[in-house]
Image (cartoon, rainbow, N blue to C red):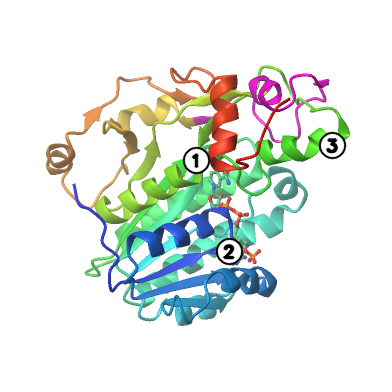
Amino acid sequence: MNKLDLTGKSVLITGGTGSLGKALTRRIFSEWPEVGRLVIFSRDEQKQFQMAQQYPSGKYPAIRFFIGDVRDRERLVRAMRGIDYVIHAAAMKHVHLAEYNPSECIKTNVGGAENVIHACLETQVSRVVALSTDKACAPINLYGATKLTSDKLFIAANNIRGKNPIRFSVVRYGNVMGSNGSVIPFFLKKRADGFLPITDPRMTRFNISLDGGVDMVFHALANAWGGEIFIPKIPSYRITDVAEAIGPEMEHPIVGIRPGEKIHEEMITASDSFNTYDMGKYYVILPTSSVWNLEEFKQEFGAKLVPAGFSYNSGSNTEWVSVEELRQLIRDHIDPTFSHA
Ligand SMILES: NC(=O)c1ccc[n+]([C@@H]2O[C@H](COP(=O)([O-])OP(=O)(O)OC[C@H]3O[C@@H](n4cnc5c(N)ncnc54)[C@H](OP(=O)(O)O)[C@@H]3O)[C@@H](O)[C@H]2O)c1
């Protein structure tokens, strides 16, 4: 197992001003203060301006803010010059907005993925990790379908690298606690209205902290051989428990499932089980055609094939976050002053 060392390395994060991008930035500066260069690539100057206040160049000389759109291939090639590691986090990620604006979602999530791959292959980038989501697994909405397409593009990119030693891999996980647009901040705000709407009382979701997501990305950067989908083992919560944790005394009206939503999310389907390995703390789905030797991989990581038909589903998960644990997680990760009373 390799340990990541970004000292002296140049890193680019697409979507660097987003929830994950900011968490990655915080962790990179705290773990490798001597990082060579850290490029934040995104579109909105206002978000970059705000982030730049947090990371003044006097104190953080390695940081660079690069305005750009992942739809713009030329701009990406320019941004990637001299970069060693790329983390591709830029995406349109709101399910209902993707349903309503399908072409826009395809342009960013699929076209953007193709452009990132092209730019990495055109330059000297050596490692690329793309962010995926549980919604990409057996997708029923366009967001998930575009992320699955993106995953496929990144996996297949390993087949067209030629003699270039670059490695592309994917990290897939579920709801990031407290990230932009996620259910916990939504419920925390909604308390002001005196009720917390439940789409479906049976609904469950995987739960991961931003730091948990960052850990998996760092692990993939250090250890990917190319073409893996890394999936951390994480607990689930019931949406009714989130409402109970945040507003136990409030009404929780059932408002009905939204377009493109599932009752339970999945990260590994039974059909994926034939290529899925248990790696201890995480699973990995291996590419069907890889450019390296499977036996060597299994030996190196102690990888064990999961039983045929295995699936990893938020509804049948064996690990759950309780109401009390949810409250503590909210205090630890979102609002230290949180109280449900
Ligand atoms: N949050 C979750 O629960 C979750 C769960 C699983 C997977 N993921 C995946 O993790 C990744 C990061 O999610 P997040 O929660 O950090 O998202 P986020 O907070 O919404 O941030 C998205 C970032 O992407 C940038 N962006 C969007 N469109 C872009 C474009 N066309 N060109 C360049 N930059 C663009 C945004 O900045 P501008 O708008 O300024 O461009 C922002 O910096 C995504 O790929 C998402 O699919 C998230």
Magenta residues, as a range? 240-266
Instruction: Tell whether label 2 touches label 1 (CB within 8 Å).
Output: no
Q: Is residue 164 above or below residue 214?
A: below
- Secondary structure under the numbered disc 3 in the rendered image: helix
Task: Quote the CA–CA distance across marks 1 and 2.
Answer: 17 Å
Circle 2/circle 3 CB separation < 8 Å:
no
Numbered badge on residue 17: 2
- Residue 70 in the magenta stretch? The answer is no
Q: Residue drawn 39% across and 36% down?
A: 232
Q: Residues within 10 Å of mark 1 (few under 14, many from 20)?
A: some
Residue at image coords 83%, 20% = 251
Q: Secondary structure at mark 1?
A: loop
Q: Quadrant of the C terminus?
A: top right
Kindly identify which residue carries mark 3. 192
* Circle 3/circle 1 CB separation < 8 Å: no
Residue under label 1, please give it. Answer: 209
Q: Position of residue 186 (x, y in %)?
A: 73, 39
Measured Cα–Cα span from mark 3 to mark 1: 25 Å
